[in-house]
Image (cartoon, grey):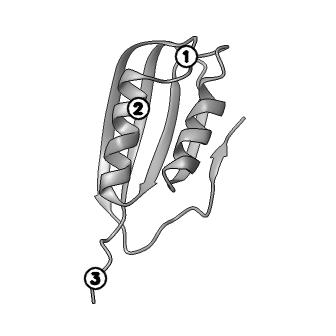
Amino acid sequence: MVEEEQPISVDYEVFGKVQGVFFRKYTQAEGNRLGLVGWVRNTDAGTVTGQLQGPSEKVREMQVWLQKKGSPKSRITKVQFQNERRLPKLEHSTFSICK
């Protein structure tokens, strides 16, 4: 029997043209496609922040997506990841868009 990997959590902030271009909606859709949970929201500083939780392999895929793809009309200039940690269990049940 294969033991299931402990999930990880990582916080992120995306810089560039990421507001007003459906970035949060696409981020939620990609997170759901990968089976991740967490959240995404706009900031007053014009960035998008959030948290990803799930298997490390899927979180890594999402990190690449945040750095290189985003929404079709977005222009990503930089992404910062921080507070990576292992979790005994997921802290969220869905991938939500925060207002």
Q: Secondary structure at mark 3?
A: loop
Quadrant of residue 15 in the image? top left
Q: Amino acid at mark 2?
A: Trp
Q: Earlier in the sequence, mark 3 or mark 1?
A: 3
Q: What is the crowding at mark 2: few (fewer than 14 residues within 10 Å), some, or many (at least 20)?
A: some
The earlier-in-sequence mark between 2 and 3 is: 3
Q: Position of residue 40 (x, y in %)?
A: 58, 38
Label 3, label 1: how far apart the Cα atoms are: 38 Å
Residue 18 - label = 1
Q: Residue at x 41, y 32 (%)?
A: 65
Instruction: Tell me the quarter of the image containing the C terminus.
Output: top right
Total residue callouts: 3
Sort mark 3 into few (<14), some (14-19) or many (20+) by Cα contacts within 10 Å: few
Q: Which residue is mark 3?
A: 3
Q: Is residue 89 left or right of residue 23?
A: left
Q: In the shown orientation, is residue 30 left or right of residue 13?
A: right
Q: Amino acid at mark 3?
A: Glu
